[in-house]
């Protein structure tokens, strides 16, 4: 389908994004679990007594987890759509997506640990 231009395209893109967030929250247990951690910590990030740039970093690395989880869920959905049959390439794609989420979580934990250690350690 040909994309619409102008403000109409922006409005549609926003609606598609909301649909994607809604679908992830409804169908992906991992996304819901991560929301339970990311949302409170995202709020808390703005109250940690550190410089604004560090606050923004604390907030941003948490959003990175959600971004990577959304991409991982998209990979899993399209892989399952193509075939539910076990296949080595499907397993590889899903495992790589999962590894990406793990790396995002490690990055986030490392940044939080470093900022909190510098402030309170």
Image (spheres, rainbow, N blue to C red):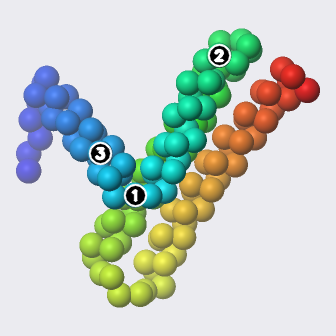
The residue under the point 81% across, 32% down is: 114
**Residue 119 image position (x, y, % from top left):** 84, 20
Q: Which of marks 2 and 1 is nearer the N terminus?
A: 1
**Residue 26 image position (x, y, % from top left):** 32, 53
Q: Residues within 10 Å of mark 2 (few under 14, many from 20)?
A: few
Name the residue tied to disc 2. 47
Q: Which of marks 2 and 3 is nearer the N terminus?
A: 3
Numbered disc total:
3
Classify mark 3: helix, strand or loop: helix
Q: Find residue 6 and report its image quarter.
A: top left
Can residue 8 be seen by looking at this rendering? yes
Classify mark 2: helix, strand or loop: loop
Q: Find residue 98 and report its image quarter.
A: bottom right
**Residue 38 image position (x, y, % from top left):** 55, 38
Classify mark 1: helix, strand or loop: loop
Q: Residues within 10 Å of mark 3 (few under 14, many from 20)?
A: few
Distance between mark 2 and mark 3 Cα atoms: 28 Å
Q: Earlier in the sequence, mark 1 or mark 3?
A: 3
Which quarter of the rendering shows the C terminus?
A: top right
**Above or below 20: residue 96:** below
Can residue 64 be seen by looking at this rendering? no
**Above or below 15: residue 51:** above
Q: Residue furthest right?
A: 121
Name the residue tied to disc 3. 22
Closer to us: 4 or 63: 63
Q: Find residue 61 and report its image quarter.
A: top right
**Is 99 left, or right, of 15 in this rendering?**
right
Distance between mark 1 and mark 3 Cα atoms: 10 Å
The residue under the point 23% across, 33% down is: 14
Name the residue tied to disc 1. 28
């Amino acid at each position: 389908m040909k994309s619409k231009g102008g403000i109409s395209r922006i409005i549609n893109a926003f609606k598609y994004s909301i649909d994607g967030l809604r679908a992830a929250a409804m169908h992906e247990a991992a996304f819901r679990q991560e929301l339970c951690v990311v949302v409170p910590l995202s709020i808390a990030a703005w109250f940690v007594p550190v410089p604004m740039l560090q606050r923004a970093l604390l907030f941003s690395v948490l959003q990175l987890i959600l971004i990577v989880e959304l991409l991982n869920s998209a990979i899993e959905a399209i892989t399952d759509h193509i075939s539910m049959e076990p296949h080595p390439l499907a397993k590889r794609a899903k495992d790589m997506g999962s590894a990406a989420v793990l790396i995002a979580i490690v990055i986030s934990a490392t940044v939080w640990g470093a900022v909190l250690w510098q402030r309170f350690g």
